[in-house]
Amino acid sequence: MSTERSNNFIEDIIEADLAAGKHKTIVTRFPPEPNGYLHIGHAKSICLNFGLSKKYGGKTNLRFDDTNPVTEDTEYVDSIKNDIHWLGFDWAQELYASDYFETLYQYASRLISKGVAYIDDSTSDAIAEEKGTPTRPGRRNKYAERSIAENLQLFADMRDGKYADGSKVLRAKIDMSSPNMLLRDPVLYRIKHAHHHRTGDNWCIYPMYDFAHGQSDSIEGITHSICTLEFVPHRALYDWLIAQLEIFPSKQYEFARLNMTYTVMSKRKLLQLVNEKHVDGWDDPRMPTISGMRRRGYPAKAIRDFADRIGVAKRENMIDLGLLEFFVREDLNKTASRRMVVLDPVKLIITNYPKGDHETLFSENNPEMPETGDRLLHFGRELWIERDDFAEEPSKKWFRLAPGANVRLKSAYIITCTGFDKDADGNLVAVYAELVANSKSGHDTSGVKAKGTIHWISVEHAVTAEVRLYDRLFRVEDPSSEEGDFKSFINPESLKVIKHAYIEPELLKAMQGEAFQFIRNGYFVLDSKLSADNHLVFNRTATLKDGWAKPA
């Protein structure tokens, strides 16, 4: 069966444009506002824009929409660039809307000179009231009657800092009765005396997004300006401004944004989670940010494959987080080295193994990649095993340790359980077993069949590490649509910290970004923020299977 997918509607548009000779090459852009960290929804847009230019031999610009100095910071600029590179993409040019402030000012002056823009002294509340409603047309106020000369002078005075924030705005003069509310004389410039992260205090007037967006696209020769569906009503203003200015005719196209279960995508809500300490920063492994997913151990390829699989649609829909986790597991199963780690240890004593003796065994690093070879394991009389791998009174389908039961120790021997000890409170403190003769893995001639296999760590050689078990941040599918504060739906089990897990000594060699499958426990990665040479911290990327309990 063919694995090739059919074109999406944007690809159809591009191919028609190229065939008609409308463009010799395509130019797209990814235009984030540097007011927060990128999330998985942005990753979809990144993969789309850069993927289109790669497919059709074009180029993609990275342009920062830095027109709101109050919320923007170079920290966000640096994180965005890092995220895009990590996803596997590079941009043709790194640009900023602030690069065009002078050009945009001249464009705005041109609109004033044409009589299609004016300075309004009204308050924001008055402007909103005069715009009317979707069922009631708006009305222009007296300021729309100002002369071109007066408007040009006032606009220059605004630039020179002669007026206070909010005292004046520049508005386009379009149609106060338009059914599209965004065409009812929209605001193009506002006064904001604030320090800008790139231009400093050179400017105290800043263009609104709707003015900066299309004009920046035009300046850069963007052929296909791809936005999400909430910008459909903005397209008419985008086209009107370009037509009035008679500049390069960039075209806007819209696709459905990514909505995903068990998370929120609003930057405002994500910022709340960070500021109110519900999470450990923007890169908390539970966050839907690209940096959070990277810290959790999600492979960049899995995110790209996910973005390709969900495709590009014209209608909003909700994507199950489980689909992203599927691609994560699919990638990690092929690439992650196998290691044994005991999270909830209890001691196993092999009574017929000589005291003080130990031996070295070997186990494959990854059965999916035989070329990665084997690693060395230390085996001895005393081992750590998982507490829940023993049952005093096992069920009929129990295939692990129990009195009288046989089990295979992974890459080692078959053992038979002979007893156990409990403390005064009834807690299990030790399990006893005997090693079955001639049962060494790979050389087994014992004839004994073991129904199950468990992992283990030599007590003598065990290394201690911290292990963090991450789960979904919210306990409901769509926390934003529920009544009440979305934070009340945070999953209290989204993080479990195990301070003293036992790991193989081989894990002391773990490198940043290196993926591991902790046998029977899931996929893990070394934490990039909390780990130190004398204190290893591993994050669970994903469980081996989707074990999330869906609500009844």
Image: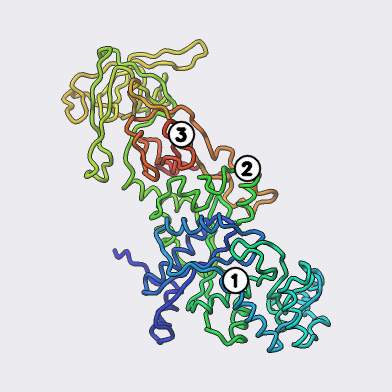
- Residue, disc 3: 467
Mark 1 lies on a secondary structure that is helix
Classed neighbour count for the residue bearing mark 3: other residues with Cα under 10 Å, few (<14), some (14–19), many (≥20): many
Q: Is residue 257 shown to the viewer in this render?
A: yes
As rendered, which of 197 and 283 lies closer to the eye? 197
Closer to the chain start, of discs 1 and 2, is: 1
Closer to the chain start, of discs 2 and 3, is: 2
Query: x and y percent of residue 96 in the render?
Result: 54, 68
Task: From this view, report whether residue 262 is shown above or below residue 395.
Answer: below
Is 454 left or right of 392, judged from the image as shown?
Answer: left
Q: Residue furthest right?
A: 142
Q: CA distance from mark 2 to mark 3?
A: 21 Å
Query: x and y percent of residue 318 in the render?
Result: 53, 58
The amino acid pointed to by label 2 is: Lys
Which numbered circle lies on residue 277? 2
Q: CA distance from mark 1 to mark 2?
A: 32 Å
Task: From this view, report whether residue 29 is shown above or below residue 81.
Answer: below
Which residue is pictured at 27% across the width and 39% down the height?
365
Task: Identify the image quadrant of the C terminus.
Answer: top right
Depth-wise, is mark 1 or mark 2 nearer the camera?
2
Q: CA distance from mark 1 to mark 3?
A: 43 Å
The amino acid pointed to by label 3 is: Val
Q: What is the quadrant of residue 140 in the picture?
A: bottom right
The amino acid pointed to by label 1 is: Phe
Closer to the chain start, of discs 1 and 3, is: 1
